[in-house]
Image: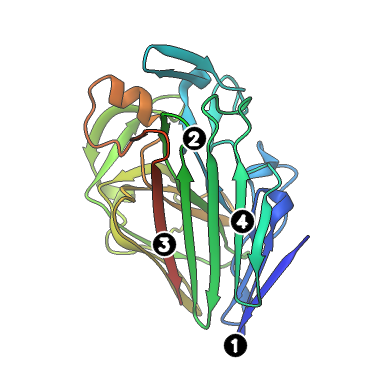
C-alpha cells in the first residue's frame, strides 16, 4: 500500500512496506530524494528514500547489547555489526491517513531487539514543509534512540552545499564506530558555513548539533529544523547523494555510555515510558 501526500505543488510518497519510509519528495518542481533502491550499494535496503532509525542509530559494535546485567547479540547486517535499527526493512501498519498526513506503527520484532517496544511515526506534508514525528514506547525497560536517514539527491554535474551547526565531531575507528573521543571540526569537516560538497567524501558524526541543518541545491534551500532531544547529525556523502541524519543519540551510544562517556544522548526507558523526537523540513 503506497500512501501519496500532496500540498499545493509539493508531493510525497510514503511506502509502509519498505520500512515505513518516505520514498519520494518532489519539492520546488524536482525530486529531492534518491527515490529507488540502489541495488549495487553495499546495503540496498538502506540506500534510498528517508527512513526512521529505531530503536538505535548507526552501528552497534559486534551487535552486542549489554543492559542491566543481561547481554544479547543482535543479528549482524553490517558485517559483524548491527546498523540503523530494527525498523527500516520491516512492513509498517498504516493507522490513519489523508491527503496531507499518514500515521504508521510497528511492533519491534524481538528477534531484532530483545526488549520489544512499539514505534510510531507521523509524516505531515504542507506547502513548503514536511514534519517528521516519531516516538518509541517501551513495553519493558529498554535503551532507546531515534533518528532519520534521508538520502538527498545530487544529480550529475550538480554540487550541493551542506551546513551543520556543530563545533565538534567524533573520532571514528576503522569500522566507522565512535571511540568516545570528540575533536574540533576543522578543514573539510567544518560545515558551519555551509560549504559546497565538491569532491569531499564525508562519513562523520557531528555532536552537540544545533538546528537547522541546511542542504542547498542550485535551485532550492531545504532546512532541517530540530531541537533536543536530537543531539547529533551524521553526514555521509557518497557519489550522487548526501545523507544528513539527525538523531537523538550517537552511534553505539549504549556501549559508550556504559564506559562513562558523557553526552551520548542514550535514553533509558522504563516500561510505559516514551522517547519522542521531531524535525521539520522547510524549503
> Counting residues from the N terminus, which is met first, the one under dot 3 or under dot 4?
4
Q: Residues within 10 Å of mark 4 (few under 14, many from 20)?
A: many
Camera sees residue 199: no
Residue 186 in the image: state x and y as whole percent.
Answer: 25, 47
Q: Which secondary structure lies at badge 4?
A: strand
Residue 139 has which mark?
A: 2
In the displayed structure, does residue 50 sit left or right of residue 137?
A: right
- Residue identified by numbered label 1: 8
In the displayed structure, does residue 224 sit left or right of residue 34?
A: left
- Residue identified by numbered label 3: 279
Q: Is residue 252 above or below residue 222?
A: above
Residue 104 has which mark?
A: 4
Residue 60 in the image: state x and y as whole percent.
Answer: 47, 26
> Counting residues from the N terminus, which is met first, the one under dot 4 or under dot 2?
4
Judge depth for marks 2 and 1 and give the one in front.
2
Of the pair 149 and 173, the residue shown nearer to us: 149
Q: How crowded is mark 2: few (under 14 residues within 10 Å), some or many (20 or more)?
A: some
> Counting residues from the N terminus, which is met first, the one under dot 3 or under dot 1?
1
Residue 224 in the image: state x and y as whole percent.
Answer: 40, 65
Q: Residues within 10 Å of mark 1 (few under 14, many from 20)?
A: few
In the displayed structure, does residue 170 sit left or right of residue 174?
A: left
Of the pair 232 and 32, the residue shown nearer to us: 232
Instruction: Name which residue lies at 29% across and 26% down.
Output: 257
Q: Which secondary structure lies at badge 2?
A: loop
Amino acid at each position: 500500500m503506497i500512501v501519496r501526500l500532496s500540498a499545493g505543488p509539493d508531493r510525497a510518497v510514503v511506502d509502509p512496506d519498505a520500512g515505513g519510509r518516505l520514498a519520494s519528495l518532489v519539492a520546488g518542481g524536482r525530486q529531492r530524494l534518491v527515490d529507488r533502491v540502489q541495488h549495487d550499494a553495499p546495503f540496498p535496503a538502506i540506500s534510498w528514500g528517508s527512513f526512521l532509525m529505531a530503536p538505535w542509530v548507526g552501528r552497534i559494535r559486534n551487535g552486542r547489547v549489554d543492559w542491566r546485567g543481561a547481554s544479547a547479540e543482535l543479528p549482524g547486517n553490517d558485517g559483524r555489526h548491527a546498523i540503523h535499527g530494527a525498523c527500516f526493512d520491516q512492513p509498517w501498519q498504516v493507522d490513519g491517513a489523508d491527503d496531507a498526513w499518514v500515521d504508521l506503527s510497528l511492533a519491534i520484532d524481538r528477534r531484532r531487539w530483545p526488549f520489544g517496544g512499539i514505534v510510531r511515526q507521523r509524516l505531515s506534508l504542507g506547502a513548503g514543509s514536511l514534519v517528521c514525528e516519531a516516538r518509541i514506547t517501551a513495553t519493558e525497560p529498554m535503551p532507546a534512540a531515534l533518528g532519520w536517514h534521508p538520502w538527498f539527491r545530487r544529480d550529475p554535474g550538480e554540487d550541493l552545499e551542506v551546513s551543520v551547526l556543530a563545533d565538534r565531531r567524533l573520532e571514528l575507528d576503522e569500522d566507522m564506530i565512535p571511540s568516545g573521543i570528540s575533536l574540533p571540526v576543522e578543514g573539510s569537516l567544518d560545515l558551519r558555513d555551509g560549504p559546497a560538497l565538491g569532491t569531499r567524501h564525508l562519513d562523520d558524526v557531528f555532536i552537540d548539533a544545533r538546528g537547522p541543518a541546511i542542504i542547498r541545491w542550485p535551485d532550492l534551500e531545504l532546512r532541517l529544523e530540530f531541537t533536543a532531544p536530537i543531539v547529533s547529525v551524521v553526514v555521509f556523502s557518497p557519489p550522487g547523494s548526501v545523507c544528513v541524519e539527525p538523531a537523538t543519540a550517537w552511534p553505539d551510544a549504549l556501549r559508550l555510555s556504559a564506559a562513562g562517556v558523557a553526552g551520548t544522548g542514550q535514553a533509558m526507558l522504563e516500561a510505559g515510558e516514551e522517547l519522542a523526537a521531531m524535525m521539520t523540513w522547510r524549503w
